[in-house]
Image (cartoon, grey):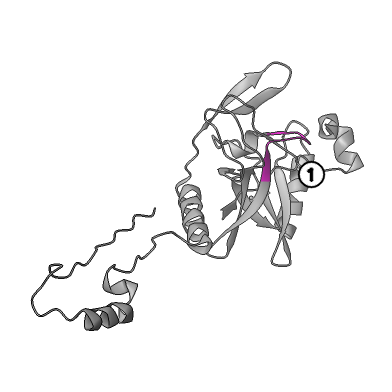
């Protein structure tokens, strides 16, 4: 199964209508003024106007719709609004080709979803070959430790987003039928043309020694 977190180098209308009811002519025959007055006072506003039913969606409904949309994007592997560019001295980087609003889903950190035992075994294998990059992201889900391994070279964008302590994206777990997916959402408004960045979160001395850019 596959998920989507950040990579750890060594090691988420209203339209209301109302219809007004109107009675007979102003001077109808046999009109009793006092009786009409009493009847008028006993009437309710709903006798003259239909009850307006708001079509405004609740926060819960909007949240459910948003989750359903993200579910579909993840399930279909849809990755839009970004492109990869080569930066001299830095390598590949991912840039936004449209604006993203704060809190908006950006992309999944896609890879193999592993339990801790299998993840550690793979990590040891990768360590035997320094030329092999390591794109393993560890996280806790329902009291268990998992890892998304995105080391395998693919065309997915999430694995190529670079690190920055002052990034414009952040990781978040997204559940689909009990399976955790690691996704990236915009931590602030992102303009078209900006490089997409997030904090890998690895502060270990060994990692920083091997990858000094983690300090920034």
Task: Quadrant for residue 46, please give it.
Answer: bottom left
From this view, report whether residue 6 is shown above or below residue 22.
above
Mark 1 — residue?
201
Q: Position of residue 66 (x, y in %)?
A: 50, 54
The residue lying furthest to the right in this view is 205
Q: Position of residue 161 (x, y in %)?
A: 65, 34
Left or right placement of residue 52 versus residue 61 in this view: left
Per the image, label 1 sits on a secondary structure element best described as loop
- The crowd level at tag 1 (other Cα within 10 Å; few <14, some 14-19, many 20+) is some
Q: Closest to the observer: 192 or 45?
A: 45
Left or right placement of residue 113 versus residue 33 in this view: right
Question: What is the quadrant of the C terminus in the image?
Answer: top right
Number of numbered discs overlaid on the protein picture: 1
Question: What is the quadrant of the N terminus in the image?
Answer: bottom right
Q: Closest to the observer: 144 or 112?
A: 144
Q: Position of residue 117 (x, y in %)?
A: 74, 59
From this view, report whether residue 166 is shown above or below residue 37.
above
Left or right placement of residue 204 versus residue 32 in this view: right
Left or right placement of residue 22 versus residue 4 in this view: left
Q: Position of residue 63 (x, y in %)?
A: 52, 58
The residue drawn where x is 85% and y is 33% is 215
Q: Closest to the observer: 49 or 186?
A: 49
Q: Closest to the observer: 85 or 31?
A: 31
The residue drawn where x is 60% and y is 22% is 85
Task: Quadrant for residue 188, please give it.
Answer: top right
The residue lying furthest to the top in this view is 88
The stretch of residues the image draws in magenta is 162-170
Q: Is residue 130 magenta?
A: no
Q: Is residue 165 magenta?
A: yes
């Amino acid at each position: 199964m596959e998920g989507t977190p950040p990579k750890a180098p060594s090691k988420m209308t209203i339209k209301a209508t109302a219809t007004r009811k109107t009675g007979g002519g102003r001077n109808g025959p046999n009109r009793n003024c006092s009786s009409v007055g009493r009847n008028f006072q006993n009437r309710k506003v709903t006798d003259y106007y239909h009850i307006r039913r708001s079509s405004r969606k609740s926060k819960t409904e909007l949240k459910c719709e948003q989750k359903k949309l993200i579910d579909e994007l993840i399930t279909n592997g849809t990755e839009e609004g970004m492109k990869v560019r080569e930066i001299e001295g830095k390598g590949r980087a991912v840039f936004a080709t449209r604006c993203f609003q704060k809190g908006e889903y950006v992309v999944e950190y896609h890879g193999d979803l592993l339990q801790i035992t299998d993840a550690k075994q793979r990590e040891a294998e990768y360590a035997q070959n320094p030329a092999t990059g390591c794109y393993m992201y560890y996280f806790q889900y329902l009291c268990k430790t998992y890892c998304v391994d995105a080391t395998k070279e693919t065309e997915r964008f999430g694995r190529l987003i670079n690190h920055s302590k002052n990034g414009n994206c952040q990781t978040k777990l997204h559940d689909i039928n009990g399976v955790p997916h690691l996704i990236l959402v915009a931590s602030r408004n992102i303009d078209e043309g900006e490089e997409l960045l997030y904090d890998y979160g690895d502060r270990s001395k060994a990692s920083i020694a091997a990858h000094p850019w983690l300090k920034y």
